[in-house]
Image (spheres, grey):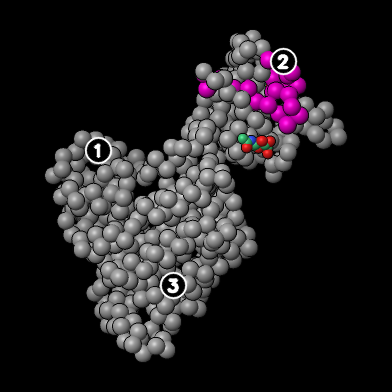
């Protein structure tokens, strides 16, 4: 509605023109196809795309979601949340796996909370029956009794002691008794029951980790610097002059409460998105807004800004409504901009957390929220990750005008690609992807969008020519997607994941 009808006659002529060019699904130009690039790693942080963003974080191996394991130097065994949580902490495991891994919640660079396998937090037993020093994992939400300091040995950072909120250090009295009552300082010796050898399973590096890692005093400056330098006006010029006609822009739910999003997120990403729309308009680039990080995380990955790998999206009506409100906000803000081409309601939801039921509920309400402000923007529905009927949302969307299904095709993230040769990878595109695409393409159903793909694979040391053939195969096959495709991504320190690098170095020509 708002995009095509405006009270200003001069503007309306060009806006109506642009609607007819590309916005009128099935009306005027059914042959328009999106040839897009994802602006990944910009408004939703992904550490692997730009690792340097994390460089200046103090104690940066202690980010939210880092999995830590602690081996007592005196008993030589690992701390373990007995039964995975809900009861005592013991120190009687010879190997470390799920129950022996403690996920960090970072308070600041020295202060942390520890989440166990079953999601409780480690704390002191302060119940009336408890003695205030036994270490347990029973609290569902962390408070002062669940807040610890990690003290590292300055010349050996893997040697640590854990200071409890009562001011004493944790000690392993026996394999079955861990208490917070060690007073002394024995100089990090191997007979000190408060010393642990720490190993880490690594941490996610998403928006939560980077903002909480820097903390309130520094995060705003770091993020604003990133937003204003990672994607600039020149990138839109590059896009429009290299055979691309659209961008898919991943955003996070916190953008809707800019300039004062809930901590640790910081304000300013909305200004960056405003700039993108200005540049898009200037260079004739279409914009697909993609809600990549939904509140409480729809897939547990860093790219949905999960704090510790947990995935809580869609579990309550309130959470779904909050997500609909984000879509409502974004569509209302940009509906009058002729570059708004589509709104993608959520990226890569993952079952079982993101159930079919909660997605159907959300998708109906999200569609209405877009339509409240725009009759022309396409509404993109993402298929779930994993093995599901690729047409599972067809019953829901088939009656909805301007609906699009987003499918992501990577020759990665599955064992079937591990031993494939160059030719097998290419054949897989021409046969398997091609037939998968035909299977979901129907004459009266939703349009199909290959919203993410990349010319990268499991193969090491492939030649430039191999990459060229692989990219060409994908362009050919995904070029048949009725809505179009989008490469992941424009920029990335890993060259093959950067369409800019691939174009500038002659690997991909559009
Ligand atoms: C970290 O947080 C704790 C608990 O709030 C506080 O006592 C401590 O001073 C903080 N440390 C730093 C370095 O900010
Ligand atoms: C560890 O200690 C707990 C508590 O006493 C006990 O139930 C469990 O069986 C022990 N596990 C091992 C592997 O010794
Ligand atoms: C790809 O398609 C071919 C031909 O239909 C089939 O034989 C093969 O099993 C498929 N490969 C995989 C990995 O799914």
What SS does tag 3 mark? Answer: helix
Q: Secondary structure at mark 2?
A: loop
Q: Residue at x 37, y 45 (%)?
A: 49
Q: Is residue 298 visible?
A: yes
The picture places residue 468, in percent across and down from the top left corner, at 16, 48
Q: Which residue is mark 1?
A: 459
Q: CA distance from mark 2 to mark 3?
A: 61 Å
Image-quadrant location for residue 279: bottom left
Q: Quadrant of the N terminus?
A: bottom left
Q: Residue visible at 42% across and 46% down?
A: 46
Determine whether, in the image, residue 46 is placed left or right of residue 34. Answer: right
Residue span colored magenta? 156-185
Left of 244 or right of it: where is 198? right
Q: Single out the residue that lies furthest toward the right.
A: 128
Task: Choose between 7 and 375: the one closer to the eye.
Answer: 7
Q: CA distance from mark 1 to mark 2?
A: 54 Å
Tell me, for residue 184, which label it has, or none: 2
Q: Which image quadrant for residue 424?
A: top left
């Amino acid at each position: 509605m708002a995009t095509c009808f405006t009270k200003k006659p001069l503007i309306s002529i060009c806006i109506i023109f642009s609607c007819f060019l590309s916005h009128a699904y099935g009306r005027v130009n059914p042959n328009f196809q999106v040839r897009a690039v994802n602006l990944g790693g910009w408004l939703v942080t992904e550490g692997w795309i730009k690792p340097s963003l994390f460089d200046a974080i103090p104690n940066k191996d202690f980010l939210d979601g880092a999995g830590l394991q602690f081996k007592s130097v005196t008993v030589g065994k690992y701390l373990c949340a007995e039964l995975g949580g809900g009861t005592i902490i013991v120190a009687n495991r010879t190997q470390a796996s799920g129950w022996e891994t403690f996920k960090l919640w970072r308070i600041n660079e020295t202060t942390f909370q520890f989440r166990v396998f079953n999601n409780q937090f480690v704390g002191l037993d302060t119940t009336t029956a408890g003695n205030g020093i036994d270490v347990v994992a029973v609290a569902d939400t962390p408070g002062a009794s669940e807040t610890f300091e990690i003290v590292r040995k300055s010349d050996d950072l893997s040697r640590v002691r854990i200071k409890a909120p009562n001011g004493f250090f944790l000690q392993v009295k026996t394999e079955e008794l861990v208490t917070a009552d060690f007073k002394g300082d024995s100089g990090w010796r191997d007979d000190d029951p408060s010393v642990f050898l720490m190993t880490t399973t690594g941490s996610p590096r998403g928006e939560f980790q980077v903002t909480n890692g820097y903390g309130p005093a520094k995060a705003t400056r770091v993020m604003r610097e990133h937003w204003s330098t990672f994607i600039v006006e020149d990138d839109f010029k590059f896009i429009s002059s290299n055979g691309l006609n659209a961008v898919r822009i991943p955003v996070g739910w916190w953008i809707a409460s800019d300039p004062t999003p809930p901590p640790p997120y910081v304000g300013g990403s909305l200004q960056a998105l405003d700039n993108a729309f200005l540049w898009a308009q200037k260079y004739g680039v279409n914009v697909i807004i993609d809600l990549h990080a939904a509140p409480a995380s729809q897939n547990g990955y860093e790219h949905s800004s999960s704090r510790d790998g947990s995935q809580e999206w869609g579990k309550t009506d309130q959470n779904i409504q909050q997500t609909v409100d984000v879509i409502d906000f974004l569509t209302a803000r940009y509906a009058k901009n002729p570059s708004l081409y589509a709104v993608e309601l959520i990226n890569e939801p993952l079952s079982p957390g993101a159930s079919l039921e909660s997605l159907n509920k959300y998708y109906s309400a999200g569609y209405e929220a877009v339509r409240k402000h725009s009759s022309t923007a396409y509404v993109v529905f993402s298929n779930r990750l994993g093995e599901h009927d690729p047409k599972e949302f067809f019953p829901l969307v088939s009656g909805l005008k301007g609906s699009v299904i987003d499918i992501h095709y990577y020759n990665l993230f599955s064992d079937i690609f591990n031993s494939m040769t160059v030719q097998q990878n290419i054949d897989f595109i021409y046969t398997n992807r091609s037939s998968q695409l035909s299977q979901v393409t129907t004459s009266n159903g939703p349009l199909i969008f290959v919203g993410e793909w990349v010319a990268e694979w499991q193969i090491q040391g492939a030649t430039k020519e191999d990459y060229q053939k692989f990219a060409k195969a994908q362009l050919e096959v995904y070029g048949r997607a009725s809505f179009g495709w989008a490469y992941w991504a424009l920029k990335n320190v890993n060259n093959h994941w950067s369409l800019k690098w691939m174009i500038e170095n002659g690997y991909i020509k559009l």
